[in-house]
Structures are given as structure tokens and as C-alpha cells.
């Protein structure tokens, strides 16, 4: 991505500082890159130290500016508090938080254990709330204006078979966005969310398209997937100056996939035991690879 891919003037975010959870890979990295290109200092956190550190180095090498990598598992409150202490010590209050870190995999709900539910809910639902709470307490105490952006999915409006822990968790964040938008509006903190359509990333395709092959939004009325700058532009708009009156909204960027098809995984109803076994094996392989990177850190 270059500045020319974005619809904003150079230096729009100069002097601002943002934290992007899960900013070392996937959509989080894309949004971090856009914030950096527009002059912000960006903190990226993730569970895998090599991934966040390498991404920070690559982004700074490509674009200059400042990206700070933090290793943090948002399932652990004490890691969040320690990270925010360091970030606040590094230059005061953040201007915004992007709740992007997530976990998800396709599975028949009857095949899940409670540990499987917790693996997802503790990242998406509980972890994003903890991030929001600990940033919020600091902003409120300091009277600092800030913008919180959460990355959701269109399923928050219609549910999604075969990804029930994810859709329950993301729906909770949709409710958080609406609720805190009101509760903290008078104190300068606003909340919005993006419901992206299909912007395939490597980690997501490994878990949501485990059969491999082209990962394309079937039935999309624009007959294509999303392009990363299309997501990044909306993220910058919601986080940056000029959109202050936009508050409490979850906005889809999906080429009208949701209106056309519901945008969820209902098509997997056609899978039988064999397809589900293959999917699970494939996802397990990818998870093992991620765990190795976490232990290296
Ligand atoms: C059933 C599964 C399973 C599967 C794991 N489990 N994969 N159950 N089917 N395919 C179960 C395990 O058996 C175990 O339960 C429990 O889940 C915890 O598994 P762990 O591997 O120990 O968990 P952990 O290492 O913490 O990994 C967390 C994770 C993993 C969520 C499972 O996928 C992950 O780290 N993902 C991060 C990246 C990611 O998911 N990206 C995609 C995001 S896409 P038992 O009972 O056996 O111990 C997204 C929205 C997309 O969020 C929107 C698209 C439009």
C-alpha cells in the first residue's frame, strides 16, 4: 500500500498515536500500515513476538515513521495493563484503539468443547472488552478524547452457522459499541465498528477456507473480494479527525454481500463427516504452526 491508495491528505494523523491489537498480521497490519502512512505512531500487539517484531521492522523499512511491537495476549488482563503502562509512559494517552485481534474457525457446533468456545470468546469478547476498559479508564481519568474502532462481521446482524463462538463474541462487541457510544459520548470517547466482507488474509483463510483453493466471496454482487485500501480508508475515517459526529455505528464494507447473500457460512450445511474431519485436521496444522511461533517469542 502507498499513500496514493488512501483518500486522505499526507500528514492527516501526524502527532497521533494508535494501538492496533493483532496488528502484526492480516487486516490489523493493513490498518496499521495506513495509520503509519498518514503520519501516526502505531503500536501493534500480538501473541507471536516474531510476527509483531518482523511486521514493525518491515513497515518502518518500507514507509519510515514509528511502529512499536508489543507482545501481548489480550486474554490475560495483566499483560494488557503492563502493555498500556509502557505505551502511556512512551508519550501519554493514545488517540485511539483498534480492537482487531480475533480467533475463529469453522466447526459444527456439536463438535465444540467449552475450551474451544473459550479459546475464541476469551480473545474476541473478553479480551477486546478488557482492552477497551483499561484504555477507557485512563482516557476518562485524563479527560482525553479518543476513538475506539472494533472489527466485527456482518453476522452480527443475522448470525452465522458453523462459527457460533465467533458470532456470539462479535455480537457482544457490536452491543458494546452501541452502548459505550452513548455512555462515554459526553466525555469525548466514541465507538464505531467495521463489518468487513471478504478481505482474504492468510490466517483467516487457513481457518475459514480450510479446504484451500480460491477464497472468494461467493455470490458477491460486485463479483470480487475486498481490496485492502477500501478497508483501510474506512478505518482511518472512523479513527481520524473529521468524523467526530459518527458514533455508535457498525458499518459494512462488503460490496453489498450481506444484502445479497447474508454473508455467512450457511453453505457449509452441505458438508458431511468427512469434510468436517478434513477441515479440522487442516486447521489443527495451522494452529500448531502458530503455537511454535508463540513459544519462540
Ligand atoms: C473444533 C477446535 C478446532 C476446530 C481448535 N479447537 N480448533 N475444535 N474444531 N477446528 C479446540 C481445541 O480442540 C481445544 O479444545 C480448544 O479449541 C483450544 O484449542 P487450542 O489450539 O489450544 O487454542 P489456541 O492455541 O489458544 O488457539 C486459539 C484459536 C486459534 C482461536 C483456536 O485458531 C487461533 O489462535 N486463531 C488466531 C488467528 C485466527 O483465528 N484468525 C482468523 C480470524 S477470522 P479441547 O477441548 O480439545 O482442549 C475472524 C472473522 C472472520 O475472526 C470474518 C470473515 C468475514
Image (cartoon, rainbow, N blue to C red):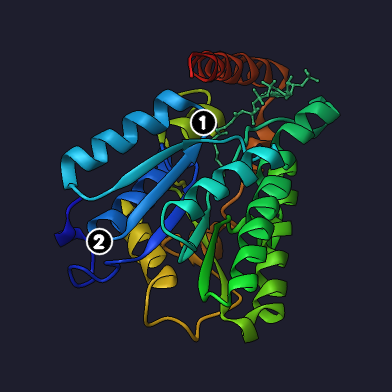
Residue 105, placed above or below residue 37: above
Disc 1 crowd, CA 10 A, few/some/many (<14, 14-19, 20+): some
Instruction: List x then y, in percent, for residue 208.
Output: 55, 34
Look at 73% across and 40% down and name the residue there. 122
Disc 2 crowd, CA 10 A, few/some/many (<14, 14-19, 20+): many
Which residue was labeled with disc 1?
A: 209
Q: Left or right? Give the position of 183 relative to 69.
A: right
The reply to whether the residue tagged 2 has its Cβ within 8 angstroms of ligand 1 is: no
Q: Give the SS element for disc 2.
A: loop
Residue 112, placed above or below residue 125: above
Look at 23% across and 56% down and name the residue there. 37
Look at 35% across and 48% down and name the residue there. 30
Which residue was labeled with disc 2?
A: 39
In this orientation, does residue 162 appear?
Answer: no
In this orientation, does residue 186 appear?
Answer: yes
Q: In this orientation, which residue lies closer to the viewer: 181 or 224?
A: 181
Amino acid at each position: 500500500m502507498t499513500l496514493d491508495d488512501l483518500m486522505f491528505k499526507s500528514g492527516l494523523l501526524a502527532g497521533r498515536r494508535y494501538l492496533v491489537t493483532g496488528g502484526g498480521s492480516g487486516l490489523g497490519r493493513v490498518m496499521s500500515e495506513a495509520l503509519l502512512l498518514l503520519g501516526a505512531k502505531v503500536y501493534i500487539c500480538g501473541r507471536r513476538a516474531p510476527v509483531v517484531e518482523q511486521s514493525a521492522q518491515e513497515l518502518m523499512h518500507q514507509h519510515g515513521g514509528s511502529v512499536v511491537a508489543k507482545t501481548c495476549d489480550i486474554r490475560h488482563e495483566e499483560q494488557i495493563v503492563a502493555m498500556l503502562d509502557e505505551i502511556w509512559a512512551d508519550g501519554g494517552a493514545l488517540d485511539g484503539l483498534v480492537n482487531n485481534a480475533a480467533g475463529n474457525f469453522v466447526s459444527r457446533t456439536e463438535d465444540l468443547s467449552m475450551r474451544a468456545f473459550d479459546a475464541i470468546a476469551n480473545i474476541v469478547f473478553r479480551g477486546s472488552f478488557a482492552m477497551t476498559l483499561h484504555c477507557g479508564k485512563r482516557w476518562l481519568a485524563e479527560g482525553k478524547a479518543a476513538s475506539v474502532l472494533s472489527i466485527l462481521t456482518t453476522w452480527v446482524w443475522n448470525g452465522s452457522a458453523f462459527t457460533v463462538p465467533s458470532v456470539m463474541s462479535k455480537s457482544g462487541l457490536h452491543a458494546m459499541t452501541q452502548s459505550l457510544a452513548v455512555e462515554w459520548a459526553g466525555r469525548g470517547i466514541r465507538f464505531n465498528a467495521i463489518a468487513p466482507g471478504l478481505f482474504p488474509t492468510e490466517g483467516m483463510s487457513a481457518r475459514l477456507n480450510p479446504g484451500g483453493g480460491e477464497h472468494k466471496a461467493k455470490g458477491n454482487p460486485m463479483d470480487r473480494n475486498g481490496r485492502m485500501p477500501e478497508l483501510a480508508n474506512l478505518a482511518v475515517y472512523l479513527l481520524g479527525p473529521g468524523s467526530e459526529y459518527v458514533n455508535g455505528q457498525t458499518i459494512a464494507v462488503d460490496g453489498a454481500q450481506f444484502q445479497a447473500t447474508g454473508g455467512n457460512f450457511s453453505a457449509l450445511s452441505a458438508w458431511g463427516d468427512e469434510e468436517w474431519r478434513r477441515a479440522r485436521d487442516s486447521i489443527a496444522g495451522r494452529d500448531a504452526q502458530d503455537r511454535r511461533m508463540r513459544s519462540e517469542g
